[in-house]
Amino acid sequence: MRQLFPRVSVMIAMVTTLVLVGLSLLRPAPALSTAAEAPRLVPAILNGNPVSVLYVTRSSDTVLARCYPGFEPLMTVRTMSGNAGQKEGVLTCVSSGQ
């Protein structure tokens, strides 16, 4: 009986280890996401003035701009400096003339 107990305990340890390794292999590994990021606001400098740059990378994102009464948002689209194929938009609030 004394020789049987160590063998049984070793077998139980081996089976437990194999079951745990097998279960860990069945669990899906976390995948690296290549999806576009959520919008984020980043401080920057534009023409020497501090501004906030809103990076929107998903086509389903929308941006709501509100201006003070008597002003309306105006979007100007231009080519990004250094990136001839990309565009950027500058949103400003201008007087609505009322």
Image: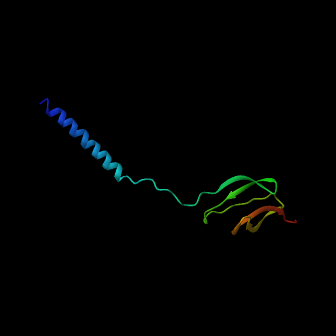
Which of the image's four quarters has the N terminus? top left
- The image quadrant that residue 79 belongs to is bottom right
Q: Is residue 32 left or right of residue 91?
A: left
Residue positioned most to the left: 1
Tell me where residue 41 appears, x and y as whole percent.
68, 54
Residue positioned most to the right: 97
Q: Is residue 55 left or right of residue 93?
A: left
Vertical relation: 1 (above or below) 41: above
| Residue ID at (75%, 68%) | 78
Tell me where residue 16 appears, x and y as whole percent.
27, 42
| Residue ID at (14%, 29%) | 2
Vertical relation: 2 (above or below) 70: above
- The image quadrant that residue 98 belongs to is bottom right
Residue positioned most to the front: 82
Tell me where residue 93 appears, x and y as whole percent.
80, 61
Vertical relation: 98 (above or below) 8: below
